[in-house]
Image (cartoon, rainbow, N blue to C red):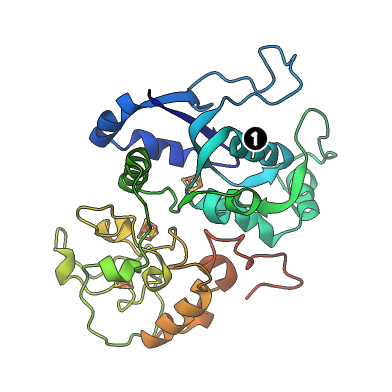
Amino acid sequence: MPVRVAEEWLATCGGCEVTILDIGEPLLNILPKLQFVHMPVLMDNKYFGQTGEKKALEIPQADVGIITGSIRNKENRHIAEEMRKKCKTLIAMGSCACYGGIPALGNLSTKDEILDKVYRGSKSTDSASNPNKDIPEMEDRVYSVAEVVKCDIELPGCPTSPELFAEALTALLEGKPFKLSEKSVCDECPTKREKKAVSNLKRPLEPIEAKPGQPLSEVRCLMEQGFLCQGPATKSGCGGTTDKTPRCIKAYMPCRGCFGPIRKGANPMVDMMNALSTAGLKADQIADRAATFNRFIGVVGRLRPAAGPRR
Ligand code: SF4
Ligand code: SF4
Ligand code: SF4
């Protein structure tokens, strides 16, 4: 009997669904064991029947449920709760589902501020009242799926890595335990650390000190070159299980922290302040530190509307 899988996307960009398709060959090995019974991104789906005639949300029973995206409105919450009821095992996939992700940057503003900006305060918008017909009511703030329902597996990353997803799914199918790494991106980074301090922070798109095609093992650590690299405070795993080189570093770009904190309860902002000062960089050169260091993890209690200008 194939394993029944249900997938749902809430406040999301769809990038995590691309990750599922991106698994490549290992997906071909897993696919015969799976039966996707619900996946709105790929299949026509009517939550309340073909003509809206049903009263209750229709999500079929499944062995494994996968949810991407965060919870921005009451419909998102309702779907997450229904998925929890219908799925034996639930996977929160991607940093939006685990930590709020990019949508949780909205937690820097109140719901009223956001609605005012979108429907009245934007230069490109004709001022109008808030729409209130046939659309779900917004939540007071963005929540992660993991805050609202119990998730059996949380796979962070924006998006998570296809290898990590395949590994988690295979472990589930084989009844084996699955555990995320508690190492940092720096632990998997092959760049060369010279422990020499720099003083000025570079802009993200300034060229790095590397010749075209130069092996990463000969390239100096990007933080030591003056780039804001969040590798010291970010969980490893984005590079997958074979090569392990972190995804952005492989592209000669600094880590932006999408895999979230190394372990539960860690505070990436404090960890990054320490790492920056060790590299000789001053944190006050970063314009919006709360948003920068919590870009993907806004619901972990750190992003909230500010009374005055943010630091
Ligand atoms: S985690 Fe990133 S890729 Fe996945 S849905 Fe959220 S924004 Fe998109
Ligand atoms: S700070 Fe960035 S470039 Fe330097 S070792 Fe860590 S991940 Fe690599
Ligand atoms: S290097 Fe950092 S930002 Fe890039 S994918 Fe990995 S964890 Fe995410």
- Residue 259 in sight: yes
- The residue shown at (49%, 23%) is 37
Q: Position of residue 86 (x, y in %)?
A: 59, 32
Q: Nearer the viewer, residue 66 or 105?
A: 66
- The residue shown at (56%, 27%) is 61
Residue 18 horizontal side relative to residue 97, left or right: left
Residue 59, placed above or below residue 173: above
Residue 69 horizontal side relative to residue 53, left or right: left
Residue 287, placed above or below residue 236: below
Q: Position of residue 246 (x, y in %)?
A: 29, 59
- Asked where in the image residue 309 lies, by quadrant, the reply is bottom right
- The residue shown at (34%, 68%) is 183
Q: Nearer the viewer, residue 186 or 165?
A: 165
Q: Quadrant of the C terminus?
A: bottom right
Q: Position of residue 26 (x, y in %)?
A: 25, 36
Which secondary structure, mark 1? helix
Q: Position of residue 222 (x, y in %)?
A: 30, 72
- Residue 13 in sight: no
- Asked where in the image residue 138 lies, by quadrant, the reply is top right
Residue 63 horizontal side relative to residue 172, left or right: right
The kind of residue on which mark 1 rests is Glu
Residue 71 horizontal side relative to residue 244, left or right: right
How many numbered discs, if any? Answer: 1
Q: Is the residue marked 1 within 8 Å of ligand 1, measured from its CB?
A: no
- The residue shown at (32%, 46%) is 167
Q: Is the residue marked by circle 1 packed among few (<14), some (14-19), or many (20+) residues within 10 Å?
A: some
Residue 103, placed above or below residue 76: below
Q: Quadrant of the N terminus?
A: top left
Residue 70, placed above or below residue 300: above
Residue ranking furthest to the right: 129
Q: From the image, tell me which residue sits under label 1.
A: 82
